[in-house]
Image (cartoon, rainbow, N blue to C red):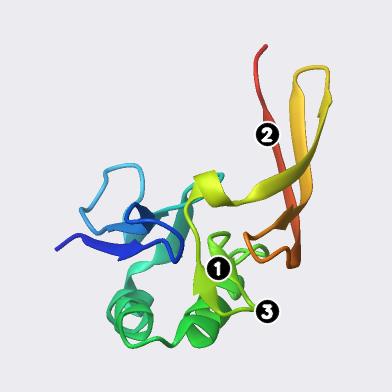
Amino acid sequence: MDSEFPCAACPRPALRIDVVERDYLPGHFLVHQVLDDLILRREVEQTFIALLGSGGLAEADAIARAQDKNGILAYCPTCSKLYCKDHWELVERRDGPFLTVRAARCPERHLKLIDYERRLYD
């Protein structure tokens, strides 16, 4: 069962949970979010989805942070809301083929520190 969780600022999803078993990710499930997919262990799936559905965003973020240092990128811990990628203002730097993001601001202007880097091209 896939699940979507809406953005607090528009009707688009802020998170989409893909629970289909992938050959390249045995024992894990995907959370599609702001910058990159979050990969979590299958044993936390039901708890994670239940927390998101019941408003336990801080607890769901703690589960995510135990497996990924950035936790739920769509989640603003200050206003306790989820936002889609269109509503985050990224503080980014491009250095050659790399994109580095160190912080983001939610629509309410709360700053969230993150540590994200990816190669844009070869």
CA distance for labels 2 and 1: 20 Å
In this view, the residue in front, 63 or 109, is 109
Q: Nearer the viewer, residue 29 or 61?
A: 61
Q: Which mark is residue 118?
A: 2
Q: Are marks 3 and 1 in contact (CB under 8 Å)?
A: no
Amino acid type at mark 3: Thr
Residue at figure coordinates x 68%, y 47% from the top left: 89
Q: In terms of image quadrants, where is residue 1?
A: bottom left
Which residue is label 1 attached to?
75
Image spot of residue 11 (x, y percent): 32, 56
Comparing labels 3 and 2, the label whose residue is closer to the camera? 3
Mark toward the start of the polypeptide (3 vs 2): 3
Residue 44 image point, x, y percent: 37, 78
Compared to residue 69, the image places residue 30 above or below, namely above
> On the image, which quarter does residue 65 sit in?
bottom right
Q: Residue at x 56, y 80 (%)?
A: 80
On the image, the x and y values in percent for residue 100 come to 78, 38
Q: Disc 3 versus disc 1: distance between alpha carbons?
A: 9 Å
In the rendered structure, which disc, 2 or 1, sits on the residue that comes first in sequence? 1
